[in-house]
Amino acid sequence: MSTQVFTLPDLGEGLTEAALVRWLVAVGDTVAVDAPVAEVETAKAVVEVPSPFAGVVAQRHGEEGATLTVGEPLISVEAPAAADTYVEEERAGSGNVLIGYGTSAAPARRRRRANRAAGAPAPAGARPAVKSPIVRQLARRRGIDLATLTGTGPHGVITRRDVEAATAAADVPAAPDVDRRTGLPIRTRVPLRGMRKAVTETLTRSRNEIPEATTWVDVDATALLELRAELAAGGAAPGVLAMVARFVVAGLARFPELNARVDTERDEITHLDGVNLGIAAQTVRGLVVPAVRDAHRMGMRGLDAEIRRLTAAARDGSSTAAELTCGSFTLNNYGVLGVDGSAAIINHPEVAILGMGRIFPRPWVVDGEVVARRIVQLSLVFDHRVCDGGTAGGFLRFVADAVESPTSAMADL
């Protein structure tokens, strides 16, 4: 037997750190190669980290809620001499250990999840069922031993309320947490890390570096909705977002300045050959932007299928780092949030983002008569370094005209 130290592997895509969300093993547990040992949150997703070693867990390095950098120890495993090697992917330095390539661990994970779903009790000696690092921190601050608590959350998970109830029962004095400026009590503190930290850094950099400008137009989408209804009558029809996405991709072919990068080190603007279309998706963990690779090669139905797949993956946390970092232009449908318009922030290092508000009936003048039409606002935020208003307006007008006359637009695509 020898002790093998497994360090946090290369995360890929320029990611250098991860927050330790939850340990999946305890000291003394036996683990197999590829068995998940910890759940970490990177700037892109929450993933399980599988062990490259088989053996017995000798030490866990780090508390839940801590931030680890690549190369820092994660766990130490007492491994047989014959198992003192990384799996092939880790030796190659591909980063696949973090992305998830589990083999033998998958059935074990399914059994563990099935037991939790059935409400099976935790085995004797198991660590307290706490998922939230905030709850652990609160318990430490108030001197509460989590092992003494019975969780009231789903499947026995210990919640903040459980810790607060234990505090009251033990009459443990807790120092008041008060905002210095207002004097108001602080309800909760949310650590700025993982995805929230990445969003903060990206958007702050966008505001600091990009001289942005915004232009918008109200568009009559009645014909677009009628066309979609006709397509639906003949079978499955693409969603409105996919239809607009197809027009966006066609517009970028005509106005490549908006599908570009600004290279400040080389003092040049790089126009890209092809489009990876980012689709902004709101999830419980925040806003993410998975991208449809090679969107310029797809029709409306192909775009629709890929948009649905990517947004579903984003919401269940299974998006890969590559999917979340390869976009060249972003389409943001904030209309699903029930709002008409927004001055969006460009997803750095992209140079433009097109926003789409809700579609709803409004009075509209058609052939001199005021009638009810289905109107949507499109807004384009662009980097003024790559083009001027003429180019931005031309692109926005192209998309707007396609939405208003979709049949003729599709004939020209």
Image (cartoon, rainbow, N blue to C red):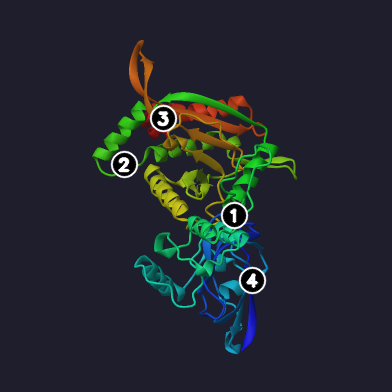
Q: CA distance from mark 3 to mark 1?
A: 38 Å
- Answer with mark 2 or mark 3, whichever residue precedes in sequence: 2
Q: CA distance from mark 1 to mark 4?
A: 19 Å
Q: Which residue is mark 4?
A: 61
Going by the numbered disc 4, the residue's amino acid type is His
Look at the numbered disc 4 and give the secondary structure of its residue: loop
- Answer with mark 3 or mark 4, whichever residue precedes in sequence: 4
Q: CA distance from mark 4 to mark 2?
A: 51 Å
Say which mark, if any, is on residue 194: 1
Look at the numbered disc 2 and give the secondary structure of its residue: loop
Q: CA distance from mark 1 to mark 2?
A: 37 Å
Question: Which residue is rendered at x = 64% and y = 44% of the image?
Answer: 178
Look at the numbered disc 1 and give the secondary structure of its residue: helix
In the rendered image, residue 69, in percent from the top left (x then y), is placed at 67, 63
Q: Residues within 10 Å of mark 2 (few under 14, many from 20)?
A: some
Q: CA distance from mark 3 to mark 4?
A: 55 Å
Going by the numbered disc 3, the residue's amino acid type is Val
Question: Which residue is rendered at x = 31% and y = 41% of the image?
Answer: 237
Going by the numbered disc 1, the residue's amino acid type is Gly
Q: Which residue is mark 3?
A: 403
> Is 413 displayed left or right of 16 in the figure?
left
